[in-house]
Image (cartoon, rainbow, N blue to C red):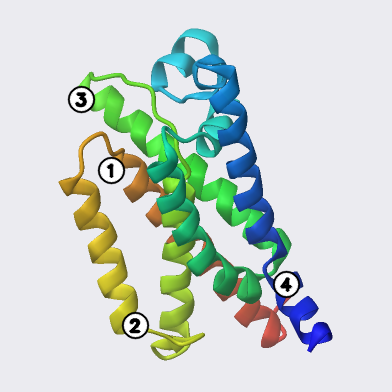
């Protein structure tokens, strides 16, 4: 039993680690006031004025309040465990950061087109990317993977998008950008793996 529990924990160690980092930084923010938010939040104006590219990464580890943190971490835990098990730890980390950055860049495009600039924080772009990855994985397994059916995946995605548009102060551009980033990268993962299996390395 202990060996089985250890194996299961190792299968989701990256997901658990990312959640731990998010929680740790949130606790730090409670004691540091606005310091991390002012230095880590993302907006296109920071790229245009100061070339502060690090904000593409730092912003995805900051959260406004407990509800914001818990909502993102719950979805990351539920979807991340399955995705990490499928793609492996290294690819999962790349997926997480790629999706988060894609979400921020899509938000930057929205800011530019709308002419409305505002700071953005949160892991939701990365989390949407992980959920998008799970969608591709389920689709590639004939509509079922890890107890998740295609019907449940579609409902989950539609519900997440709907709630985003129904809730105030939500960065829906980052959600959509992260979602498509996760779908794109996981599609590449799957195609590369299938070519490898067929001997076309």
Q: Which residue is mark 2?
A: 150
Measured in 3D between alpha carbons, the distance from the residue under mark 4 to the one under mark 2, in whole angstroms, is: 26 Å
User: Which numbered disc, 2 or 3, marks the residue that appears first in the sequence?
Assistant: 3
Q: Is residue 39 left or right of residue 74?
A: right
Q: Which residue is mark 1?
A: 172
Q: Is residue 40 left or right of residue 159?
A: right
- Residue 9 position (above or below residue 14): below
Measured in 3D between alpha carbons, the distance from the residue under mark 4 to the one under mark 3, in whole angstroms, is: 44 Å
Q: Which residue is mark 3?
A: 114
Q: In the image, which disc is placed on residue 9?
A: 4
User: Which numbered disc, 3 or 1, marks the residue that appears first in the sequence?
Assistant: 3
Q: Is residue 51 left or right of residue 127?
A: right
**Res 169 seen here:** yes
User: Which numbered disc, 4 or 3, marks the residue that appears first in the sequence?
Assistant: 4
Measured in 3D between alpha carbons, the distance from the residue under mark 2 to the one under mark 1, in whole angstroms, is: 23 Å
Nearer the viewer's eye, disc 4 or disc 2?
Answer: 4
Q: Position of residue 114 (x, y in %)?
A: 20, 25
Nearer the viewer's eye, disc 4 or disc 1?
Answer: 4
Label 2 CA crowd tier, 10 Å (few <14, some 14–19, many 20+): some
Q: Position of residue 43 (x, y in %)?
A: 41, 22
Q: Marks 4 and 1: CB-CB under 8 Å?
A: no
**Res 181 seen here:** no
């Amino acid at each position: 039993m202990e060996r089985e529990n250890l194996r299961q924990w190792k299968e989701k160690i990256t997901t658990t680690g990312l959640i731990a980092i998010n929680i740790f930084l949130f606790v730090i923010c409670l004691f540091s006031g606005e310091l991390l938010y002012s230095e880590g939040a993302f907006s296109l104006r920071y790229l245009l004025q100061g070339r502060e590219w690090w904000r593409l990464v730092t912003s995805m580890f900051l959260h406004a309040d407990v509800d914001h943190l818990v909502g993102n971490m719950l979805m990351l835990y539920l979807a991340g465990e399955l995705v990490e098990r499928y793609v492996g730890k290294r690819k999962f980390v790349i997926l997480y950061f790629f999706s988060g950055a894609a979400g921020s860049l899509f938000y930057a495009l929205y800011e530019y087109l709308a002419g409305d600039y505002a700071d953005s924080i949160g892991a939701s772009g990365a989390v949407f990317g992980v959920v998008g990855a799970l969608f591709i994985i389920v689709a590639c397994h004939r509509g079922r993977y890890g107890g998740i059916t295609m019907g449940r995946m579609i409902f989950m995605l539609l519900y997440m998008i709907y709630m985003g548009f129904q809730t105030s102060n939500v960065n829906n551009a980052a959600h959509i950008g992260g979602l498509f980033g996760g779908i794109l990268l996981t599609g590449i993962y799957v195609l590369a793996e299938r070519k490898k299996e067929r001997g076309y390395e």
